[in-house]
Image (cartoon, helix red, strand yellow):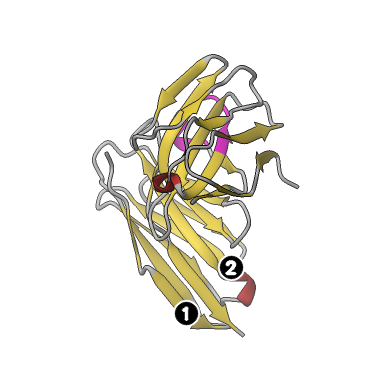
Amino acid sequence: EADIYQTPRYLVIGTGKKITLECSQTMGHDKMYWYQQDPGMELHLIHYSYGVNSTEKGDLSSESTVSRIRTEHFPLTLESARPSHTSQYLCASSPSGFSGANVLTFGAGSRLTVL
Amino acid sequence: ILNVEQSPQSLHVQEGDSTNFTCSFPSSNFYALHWYRWETAKSPEALFVMTLNGDEKKKGRISATLNTKEGYSYLYIKGSQPEDSATYLCASTGFQKLVFGTGTRLLVSP
């Protein structure tokens, strides 16, 4: 049973549309993350949050934005989708404490295709 | 940014074979090494987190070792089964954020 939920799982959309990828977790984790993965490539961190009203950009530059108004919710938004945004987006969360040793719990991913 | 490398990129074995993969990472500023298993259409799930040089972890037929001085970790699967087919990801961190490798895709044929 999933403790972190992502919707939609699959989305095909036209260029210029605004999209929001939803991510919710029920574990009360303070830390949440968004990773992007292109086929055959590594997972790259694009956004993270260490708590409510805290958001930071990750190692890979992204045109997306995130918000963290509630502990359990960490949506990702693209204001104007482009074909270069076609990718898989994975949401994850982890408990507080020393970051490096905390296990990540992942959602099942949102696969976005922009035509 | 850390550079984490995994080999081989993919592997095809027969049921019952034992196999192992390698994860290489920078040994300087090391804090933790993670292994995740990612089945198609499912969420990646954590297998192990290791922090100490010489650490060995085991979960059923899967085990992992860690050498922080030379910067590598091995993942072993004993007697592979078709249900072991998945992508195995490793990730390393200095202190804050994890950096992932590209993964090793394992296919186990009956």
* Residue B33 in view (yes/no): no
- Measured as percent of width and height from the top left, residue A110 is found at 58, 47
Tell me the amino acid under the disc marked 2: Arg
Tell me the amino acid under the disc marked 1: His
Give the answer, above or below, for where B75 lies relative to A9.
below
Question: Residue placed at 59% from the left, 28% from the top?
Answer: A74
Q: What SS does tag 1 mark?
A: strand
- Judging from the image, mark 1 belongs to the subunit labelled B
Pointer 1: residues within 10 angstroms few (<14), some, or many (20+)? few
**Residue segment shown in magenta:** A92-102
Residues at circles 1 and 2 in contact by the CB criterion of under 8 Å: no
In the image, is residue A101 part of the stretch drawn in magenta?
Answer: yes
* Residue corresponding to mark 2: B61
- Measured as percent of width and height from the top left, residue A79 is found at 49, 30
In the image, is residue B95 part of the stretch drawn in magenta?
Answer: no
Residue A29 vs residue B26: left or right? right
* Residue A10 in view (yes/no): yes
Pointer 2: residues within 10 angstroms few (<14), some, or many (20+)? few
User: In terms of sequence position, does the residue under pointer 1 or pointer 2 come before the other?
Assistant: 1
Which image quadrant is residue B62 in? bottom right
Question: Residue placed at 46% from the left, 74% from the top?
Answer: B19
Q: Quadrant of the N terminus of chain B?
A: top left
Q: Which mark is residue B55?
A: none
